[in-house]
Image: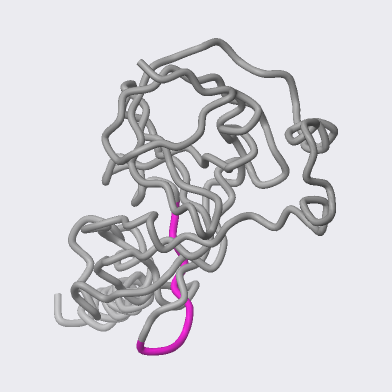
Amino acid sequence: MMSQSPPLLAGMGSGLGCLAGMGQCVGSMAYGNEKAISQASAKGKVKWFNGTKGYGFITLDNGGDAFCHASALQAAGHSDVPPGTTIVCDLADSARGMQVVTVHSVDTSTAEAPSRGPRRDGFGGGGGGGFHHRDSGPSGPMVEGKIKFFNDQKGFGFVMPDSGNGDIYLHASALRRSGVQQVEPDQRIRYSTRQGNKGVEVDRVEIL
């Protein structure tokens, strides 16, 4: 029987090698569940996020970028986030580098306004919203929600849909186009959306 030990041990050695080699794979499979967190409650801002592709990157306050999969945002109740949104999250090491595993909070009040180019300048007049349409798709059905915030100086804000989906970008031109002078946080509205240059945005607004 002793003569059989070396082959058996050799086989076990191979198996142990496999197990050692599987370390990365096991760690990768555990990502998002039991993988050790390398940074807890890290803070950063969205560098970019593509809802269609289902991922993006967060620029961390302490330096570097972290990969963010859509599933991490969806677990926090968000399907999309604009650049500049502040995120507090847990991070883990992965084959891609730092990766978001848990999102604790999402603050869209810090988001950047999507670039609209110089078309707002020099055209005061009553045709206010017209310049905006050529970028955008057709308007969708009217639904209800409430204003999350609106910054008059920056000319944009966000709407929280009653459906519970992610916040929707609201540009000042949509208010002008709808004949609405101003909006306040938590104000109830009915609105329609359309596809703009930077994603879904509010098209028309009615105050409830």
Asked whether residue 136 is drawn in magenta, I would say no
Asked which quadrant contains residue 17, the reply is bottom left
Residue 135 picture location, percent across and down: 80, 37
- Seen in the picture, residue 123 relative to 64 is either above or below; the reply is above
Q: What colour scheme has been applied to the protein in the rendered image?
A: one colour
**196 with respect to 172 (left or right):** right
Residue 33 picture location, percent across and down: 21, 55
In this view, which residue lies farthest toward the bottom?
A: 63
Which residue sits at x=58%, y=24%? 179
**194 with respect to 39 (left or right):** right
Asked which quadrant contains residue 186, the reply is top left
The residue closer to the viewer here, 82 or 124, is: 124
The residue closer to the viewer here, 143 or 131, is: 131
Viewport quadrant of the C terminus: top left
**161 with respect to 121 (left or right):** left
Residue 138 picture location, percent across and down: 73, 19
- Seen in the picture, residue 137 relative to 30 is either above or below; the reply is above
- Seen in the picture, residue 173 relative to 19 is either above or below; the reply is above
The magenta stretch is 62-69
